[in-house]
Amino acid sequence: MAIHYPHILLVEDDDVDAEAVTRALKRQKLPNKLIHAGDGIEALNALRGYDGNEPLKQPYLILLDLNMPRMNGIEFLRAIRQDAELKRSVVFVLTTSNQQEDKMAAYNQQVAGYIVKANLTNDFSDITKLIEQYQLIIDLPVETSLRR
């Protein structure tokens, strides 16, 4: 069985955290292509292919921060869950928030997991281990039809 390495869409407004995740992926030598969006609006544009760009093709995983300007993580989750083309997106929340209401709001939008940054190692290697194991075990569907 061939592994289809999913693209990773990192939705993160903190440049330091985004760089730490990028370095961790490179250090682990994961073959996944990383796309970075600074907020939910940029992420939706990447997924939908606005501004003359092609939509991000399946398979992909989304690492989503919650506290962002313009469109926060919960608003982004609501938007993709209401979109027929995006509603099955696999999303892991990666946030500083340890608030129960944020966890409930995220899980109510069918996230695959909720990860509090403070519970991770400083170099974000836990994230790369999660992604590596996830893509080895989980069989994600590969896009077979054209989008709108």
Image (cartoon, rainbow, N blue to C red):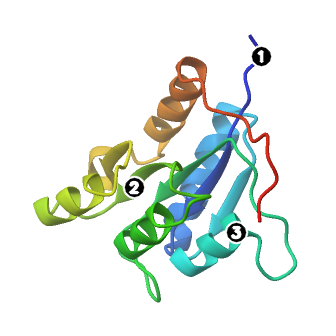
Q: Amino acid at mark 1?
A: Ala
Foreground label between 1 and 2? 1
At x 52%, y 67%, the residue is 16
Q: Quadrant of the C terminus?
A: bottom right
Give the residue at mark 2: 94
> Spatial distance from mark 1 to mark 2, Cα to Cα?
28 Å
User: Please, is residue 141 above or below residue 2 in the view?
Assistant: below
Q: Please state which amino acid type lies under the numbered disc 2.
A: Leu
Q: Which residue is mark 3?
A: 48
Q: Mark 1 or mark 3, which is nearer the start of the sequence?
A: 1
Position of residue 101 in the picture relative to residue 39 (left or right): left
Residue at position x 27%, y 45% in the image: 119
Quadrant hosting residue 2: top right
Instruction: Name the secondary structure under disc 1.
Output: loop
Most extreme residue toward the right is 52
- Label 1 belongs to which residue? 2
